[in-house]
Structures are given as C-alpha cells and as structure tokens.
Amino acid sequence: MSALDPADVVRALWERMEARDWEGARATLADGYVADWPASHERFGSADAFIAMNRAYPEGWAITVDETVADGARVVARVRVHHAGHLFHCLSFADVDDGRITRSTDFWLDDGGDAAPADRAPFRSPYPMPPEVH
C-alpha cells in the first residue's frame, strides 16, 4: 500500500468499508491508529477497535466518497453514509504515513440536523440534495 498516494489510501479505507472488506480496510490502518469523533466524544484507540466497531454497526448502510483533498500526508475526505432512511455526512481529517492511516478526526452530522435560523431566510436558497444510494 505504500506506493499509493495518501488520498488513495484514505479513499481505499472508505471503499473497503463499503465493500465490507474488513481485512482490506484494516490493511489501510497503521497498528497505532487512533480515531477521534469529537461530536460524540468518542475515541477508538486502535485500528482493531475501529474495524470491530464498524463491522458491528447495524447492516444496511452505503458509503459514498464525494471527494478527497490532500496536502502532503494530510487528507480530508467528504463522505456520505445512507442508513435506514437517513443521510449522514462525515468530514474526515486523516494523517497518512508510509502508506497507512495513522490518525483520523471525523466529524459526523445528520443531514439537516441543524435547523436554519429564520434570520438567514432572505439570503438563502435550498441546498441541492445529493442522490440517494441504495
């Protein structure tokens, strides 16, 4: 995996999780990998814990990677996850070293989870809804 560009490594993690290729997903993570999810105050302190948590998540979800942007070894991924009629967004900041992800900080939110304040109404238009993945 070390021959891959850091953005390719991050994209591979998400794509392998979508494929339920748990061994392949684990191979993208360094042994000392740590994932932080600040919105829910969670830390997954190892690659194995992170994979086990995802593997145990209730089935029926679909992942779409909308984009990845890399600045050297730092990669930002914008991801959508459809699950049980809900859409979730993730903005993931990952560090890649020697072809493996060493750390990520992932910001998860529910689509439309924050109500738009009324005082912005005169200035806004509806946000285009992304296509649903089945």
Image (cartoon, rainbow, N blue to C red):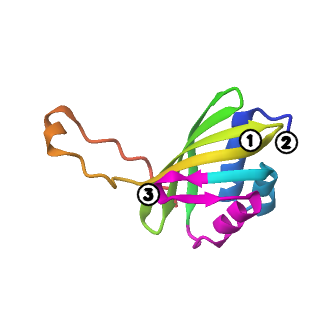
Task: Using the image, tell me which numbered label, if any, was put on residue 1.
Answer: 2
Task: Using the image, tell me which numbered label, if any, was put on residue 112.
Answer: none
Considering the image in quadrants, where does the N terminus appear?
top right
Is-magenta flag for residue 31? no
Label 2 vs label 3: CA separation?
31 Å
Q: Indicate the amino acid at tag 2.
A: Met
At which x and y percent is residue 58? 57, 73
Front residue of this view, candidates 13 and 97: 97
Q: Looking at the image, how many numbered discs can be counted on the residues?
A: 3
Label 1 vs label 3: CA separation?
24 Å
Q: Which residue is mark 1?
A: 9
Q: Is residue 109 left or right of residue 126?
A: right
Residue 8 in view (yes/no)? no
Q: Earlier in the sequence, mark 1 or mark 2?
A: 2
Q: Indicate the amino acid at tag 3.
A: Leu
> Going 83% across and 37% down the picture, which residue do you hit?
98
Q: Which residue is mark 3?
A: 87
**Magenta residues?**
36-60
Q: Indicate the amino acid at tag 1.
A: Val
- Is residue 46 positioned above or below 104 on the image? below
Cβ–Cβ under 8 Å for marks 1 and 2: yes
At which x and y percent is residue 83? 49, 65
